[in-house]
Amino acid sequence: MYENLPEEALGIISDVLRTKKSEIANIGVLKQGMTNRSFIFTCQNQKYIIRIPGEGTGFLINRQQEFDVYETIKDKGLCDNPIYINPQNGYKITEFLPQVKTCNASNLQNVKLCMEKLHALHNMKLQVNHTFDIFKQIDFYESLWTGTPSHYPDYQQVKENVFSLQTYIDKQSKQYCLTHIDAVPDNFLFSGDNIQLTDWEYAGMQDPHVDIAMFAIYSFYTQKEADVLIDLYFEGECDRATRLKIYCYMAAGGLLWSNWCEYKRKLGIKFGTYARRQYEYAKEYYEIVHNELQCRR
């Protein structure tokens, strides 16, 4: 019964729920995610989920910062409060929500509701004591390759191009607040009329418009689809400068997650199409912004 769940996890469940290990039943894999593994189990006639950090996650996620984020969003109606979260090892236990579905990025009504939820988060202007710096994180993920060159032969040029976009970003208006960073369709949970935003591992202070970019590139949106997304968030009132800034974030986000995937690849974990598409976003949206700015001169 316990073959897929580490002994450490069983001990945590037993301690947190004050139960015997023999009462932990119906264990199954709920989700084999890109960062973690999640298991569903039953205890005392209640279903729960335990999150177990995946391979190499300790280098990628600051669990104390994640803990601080959950303390900040507690009781804000953004997501259920965890029953247990460990700021050292990243284990987390939450109650299982029945009949939940994730956002369908091809369903316009789904996406509209997600953008409304995202807007509500950003309008709260929540504050934490750490920042998610995209460009520093790109360098950090690259450092985890420990000197091994990129899988992509044109990586250095692509990186130089993407980093050049900082000049434009820095000139634009920004109001930092708690930003999810990983606000992708899979992290919006629909339960009846309620929408939750889950998985706050990367959240920190940032320009909230980064969240729009991350949603777009995870969804493999075309530029036309990304523009629809932007219009939904801004209710049709996004100026051109802000739209270009979001394109910059799409390029930077593409390189960020591509570097993340390259680290995982060196651990033997491959993400195939997703990894390649993120790298392509870095190249494609640099060109879009570059060409637009050249035309303005």
Image (cartoon, rainbow, N blue to C red):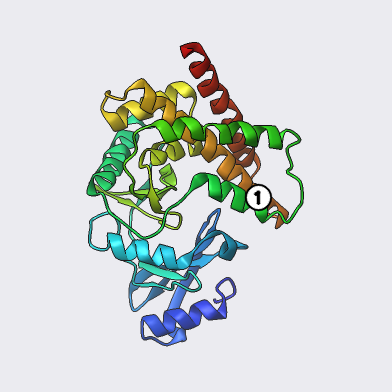
Q: Position of residue 33 (x, y in %)?
A: 53, 55
Q: Position of residue 279 (x, y in %)?
A: 62, 36
* Structural crowding at the residue carrying mark 1, measured as other residues with C-alpha within 10 Å and reported as few (<14), some (14–19) or many (≥20): many
Name the foreground residue: 226 vs 162: 162
Label total for image? 1
Q: Position of residue 2 (x, y in %)?
A: 55, 76
Left or right? Give the position of 260 relative to 169.
Answer: right
Left or right? Give the position of 281 relative to 78.
Answer: right
Which residue corresponds to the image point at 53% horizontal and 65% vertical from the top-left?
Answer: 53
The quadrant of the rendering that contains the N terminus is bottom right
Name the foreground residue: 49 vs 119: 119
Left or right? Give the position of 21 relative to 110.
Answer: right
Mark yes or no: residue 290 visible.
Answer: yes
Quarter-of-image position of residue 209: top left
Query: Which residue position is annotated with label 1?
Result: 142
Check disc 1 and report its element: helix, strand or loop: helix
Q: Position of residue 126 (x, y in %)?
A: 27, 53
Mark yes or no: residue 216 visible.
Answer: no
From this view, report whether residue 283 is shown above or below residue 92.
Answer: above
Query: Amino acid under label 1?
Result: Glu
Which residue corresponds to the image point at 33% horizontal and 75% vertical from the top-left?
Answer: 45
From this view, report whether residue 293 is shown above or below residue 76.
Answer: above
Name the foreground residue: 106 vs 240: 240
Which residue corresponds to the image point at 32% horizontal and 22% vertical from the top-left?
Answer: 239
Which residue corresponds to the image point at 46% horizontal and 13% vertical from the top-left?
Answer: 296
From this view, report whether residue 138 is shown above or below residue 76.
Answer: above
